[in-house]
Image (cartoon, grey):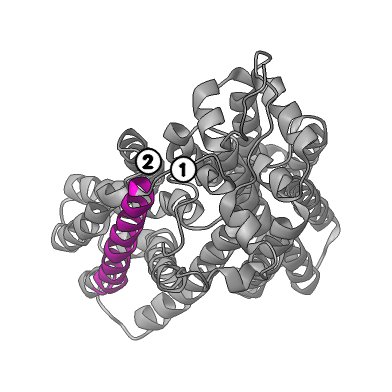
């Protein structure tokens, strides 16, 4: 028997729980994120082999690496709003197919110029695919699982980088560098085909477009016992659907939160790319063996996944309270300093770097659910995409700045201690951001609820304006 008033979507998903169908969708989103991470980091593993075959300096590949990053930034800031207009599903499928196609074409190139062009084109799909699988996954699961799911899917990109390294170790000696790009093309292409078959559209997006029948059909797929009663349109979607998605990041009180989110993402990426670009070099200059350096970076990479998932789990357990993230970057500052002070002791350096990964970059990994919680559905992909785009700007600056400092003869100890600066900026921005979000959520929770469309506000995914 149908309910007498429209149902709130978040309450309906919370009642249904986390079903096998939803878990399969989240798994597919995570696999697409892994494919994105694989393709993004592949070139880093392959530059030495490509340089040797082409008889050029590895340094000449810098333009190709930069072109890929610029392509990702362009894709993030341009295709995020497209997804909020046309839907998550189509953008995910097109973007995944795009980076698969242009990654596969790399096997035919013979020059850095052609490689750079293809990396730029692949980058257009790489960044936007990741942002949209995060946004879609968050919108299809119960409130208590949103932070974990967003962090899990986002961490898939990191896991993809780890898998790429393992695959490269096996396939590179036997089949050459082109084999890695073949894998990087075939896997996402297959995932795009699977996505066409099993990936649904965001229910919030469907409700915003008035597609009640499609929204209810998905609910019946995850719960055959669902009543089939009408769903209330998401309040903020209905209110703001006429606004341009990028403008929505600065209206209805979202502006200060957006600036803080961008500052946190930018600073966090500066730290991340400092660690993974220059730390192996710095450890080598400090006298540590290449094996020790490689182990340190691999374990740090895994620690970032664990740290992000741990913080997301705490946030979910506390009903979307992300204030646990306040501790992450301050602790990372402490451990960065300890790293600089223990360079003569490999075991202590290893422990310190793992802690930096867990608390610092782990907190960065947990920024995606914060971004998803801040914005209404009609701007969610835009919000996540622009946050990651600002971070990618930091990823461009960090390697260049680190190289300039090294060329000036800055010591290893000083380089590590300089890394505390962006870490402190991230700490301040995140502290203000999650505190602001928490206050907004508490205000939303204290307001009377009714059967109107405003009752569909999701906490933490759709707090009232002002996050």
Q: Secondary structure at mark 2?
A: helix
Question: Can residue 50 be seen in this snapshot?
Answer: yes
Residue contact at pointers 2 and 1, CB within 8 angstroms = yes
Question: What span is in magenta?
Answer: 418-446
Q: Secondary structure at mark 1?
A: helix
Q: Nearer the viewer, residue 188 or 467?
A: 467
Q: Nearer the viewer, residue 239 or 41?
A: 239
Q: Nearer the viewer, residue 303 or 322?
A: 322
Q: Nearer the viewer, residue 175 or 304?
A: 304
Q: Is residue 458 magenta?
A: no
Which quarter of the image is occupied by the N terminus?
Answer: top right
Is disc 2 surrounded by few (<14), some (14 to 19) or many (20+) residues within 10 Å?
A: many
Q: Which residue is mark 2?
A: 312
The CA distance from mark 2 to mark 1 is: 7 Å
Looking at the picture, does residue 194 appear above or below residue 205? above
Q: Which residue is mark 1?
A: 151
């Amino acid at each position: 028997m149908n309910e007498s008033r429209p149902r709130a979507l978040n309450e309906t998903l919370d009642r249904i729980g986390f079903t096998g169908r939803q878990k399969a969708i989240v798994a597919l989103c995570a696999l697409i994120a892994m494919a994105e991470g694989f393709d993004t980091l592949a070139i880093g593993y392959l530059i030495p082999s490509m340089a040797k075959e082409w008889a050029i300096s590895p340094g000449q590949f810098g333009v190709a690496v930069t072109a890929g990053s610029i392509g990702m930034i362009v894709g993030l800031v341009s295709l995020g709003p497209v997804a909020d207009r046309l839907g998550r599903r189509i953008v995910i499928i097109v973007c995944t197919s795009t980076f698969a196609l242009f990654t596969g074409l790399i096997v035919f190139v013979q020059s850095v110029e052609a490689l750079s062009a293809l990396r730029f084109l692949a980058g257009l799909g790489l960044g936007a695919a990741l942002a949209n699988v995060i946004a879609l996954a968050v919108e299809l699961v119960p409130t208590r699982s949103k932070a974990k799911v967003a962090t899990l899917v986002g961490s898939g990109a990191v896991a993809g980088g780890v898998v790429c390294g393992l695959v490269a170790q096996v396939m590179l000696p036997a089949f050459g560098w082109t084999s890695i790009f073949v894998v990087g093309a075939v896997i996402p292409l297959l995932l795009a085909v699977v996505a066409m078959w099993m990936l649904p559209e965001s229910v919030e997006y469907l409700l915003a477009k008035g597609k009640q029948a499609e929204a209810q059909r998905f609910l019946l797929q995850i719960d055959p016992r669902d009543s089939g009663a009408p769903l209330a349109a998401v309040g903020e979607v209905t209110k703001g659907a006429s606004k341009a998605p990028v403008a929505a990041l600065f209206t209805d009180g979202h502006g200060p939160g957006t600036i803080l989110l961008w500052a946190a993402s930018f600073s966090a990426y500066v730290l991340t790319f400092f660690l993974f670009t220059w730390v192996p070099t710095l450890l080598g200059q400090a006298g540590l063996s290449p094996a020790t350096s490689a182990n340190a970076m691999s374990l740090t990479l895994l620690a970032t996944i664990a740290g992000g998932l741990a913080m997301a789990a705490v946030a979910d357990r506390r009903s979307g309270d992300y204030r646990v993230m306040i501790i992450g970057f301050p602790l990372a500052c402490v451990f960065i300093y300890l790293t600089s002070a223990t360079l003569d002791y490999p075991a202590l350096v290893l422990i310190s770097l793992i802690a930096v990964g867990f608390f610092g970059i782990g907190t960065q990994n947990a920024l995606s659910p914060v971004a998803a919680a801040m914005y209404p559905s009609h701007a969610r992909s835009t919000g996540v995409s622009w946050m990651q785009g600002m971070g990618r700007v930091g990823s461009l600056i960090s390697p260049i700045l680190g190289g300039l400092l090294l060329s000036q003869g800055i010591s290893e100890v000083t380089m590590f201690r300089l890394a505390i600066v962006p870490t402190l900026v991230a700490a301040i921005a995140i502290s203000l951001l999650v505190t602001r979000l928490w206050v907004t959520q508490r205000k939303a929770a204290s307001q009377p609820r009714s059967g109107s469309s405003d009752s569909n506000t999701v906490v933490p995914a759709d707090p009232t304006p002002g996050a």
